Amino acid sequence: MSRNSFRDYCDRIDQLLEVYPNVYVENYNATILSSERANLKLRLRFYFKYLLSISEALVVVDDQIKAIDYRYHFQDGQNNLIFRYDNTPHFPSLSSFPHHKHLPDRVISCDQPNIAMVIQDAISFLEEVESSDIN
C-alpha cells in the first residue's frame, strides 16, 4: 500500500477525532503489510469509560482504500455491548450479508459503514444518554 495513501487515510481519521471533545485515543496501531494491504486498530475512549474498538483490514482497489474486513465494537463502561458493525459471514439470511450491525438484543442489516459513520453513531448515542440524564 502506498505509504502516502495510507498516511492520508490516517490523517483523515486524526482530523475527524480532533472535532470531538471527550475522546481519548487509548491505542492507535497502523501497520502497512505490503504496497496494497494494511491493518488499522484503534481503541477510543469516550468520557473515559465508553470504548469504541476499531479493526480494519485495508486494501487498495482502483486507487481507493477499502476495508475488506472490519469490526467496529462500541461498549459501555461495564463492557455491555451498545453496537458492533462487522462483516463476519454468520448471518446469511440478512439482506446486507455479510454486513450487519449487532445491537444488545438483535442483529440487523446494514450497509458497510466507514469510520466516520461509526464514530458519529457512537457520538449520537452518547448525546442521547447525556440528554436523558439531564431530563
Image (tube, rainbow, N blue to C red):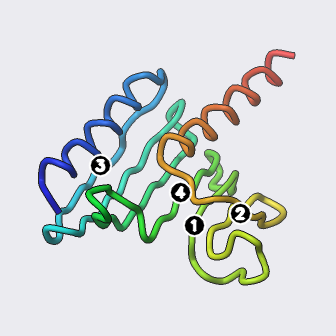
Mark 2: secondary structure = strand
Q: Which residue is mark 3?
A: 28
Distance in Å between CA atoms under marks 4 and 1: 6 Å
Position of residue 126 relative to residue 113, above or below, is above
Q: Point out residue 55 in the picture as x, y percentages from the top left corner.
A: 42, 61
Q: Point out residue 84 in the picture as x, y percentages from the top left corner.
A: 63, 59
Position of residue 13 relative to residue 93, above or below, is above
Task: Indicate the amino acid at tag 2.
Answer: His
Task: Indicate the amino acid at tag 4.
Answer: Tyr
Q: Residue at x 75, y 30 (%)?
A: 129
Q: Residue at x 26, y 55 (%)?
A: 29
Report which quarter residue 23 is drawn in: top left
Q: Which residue is mark 2?
A: 102
Q: Nearer the viewer, residue 78 or 60?
A: 60
Residues at marks 2 and 1 touching, judged by CB atoms closer than 8 Å: yes
Mark 3: secondary structure = strand
Distance in Å between CA atoms under marks 3 and 2: 24 Å
Task: Indicate the amino acid at tag 1.
Answer: Asp
**Structural crowding at the residue carrying mark 1, measured as other residues with C-alpha within 10 Å and reported as few (<14), some (14–19) or many (≥20):** many
Q: Residue furthest right?
A: 135
Q: Which residue is mark 1?
A: 86
Residues at marks 4 and 1 touching, judged by CB atoms closer than 8 Å: yes
Q: Residue furthest front?
A: 62
Foreground: disc 3 or disc 4: 4
Q: Nearer the viewer, residue 24 or 111?
A: 111
Task: Indicate the amino acid at tag 3.
Answer: Tyr
Distance in Å between CA atoms under marks 4 and 2: 10 Å
Mark closer to the chain start, 1 or 3: 3
Q: Which mark is residue 72?
A: 4
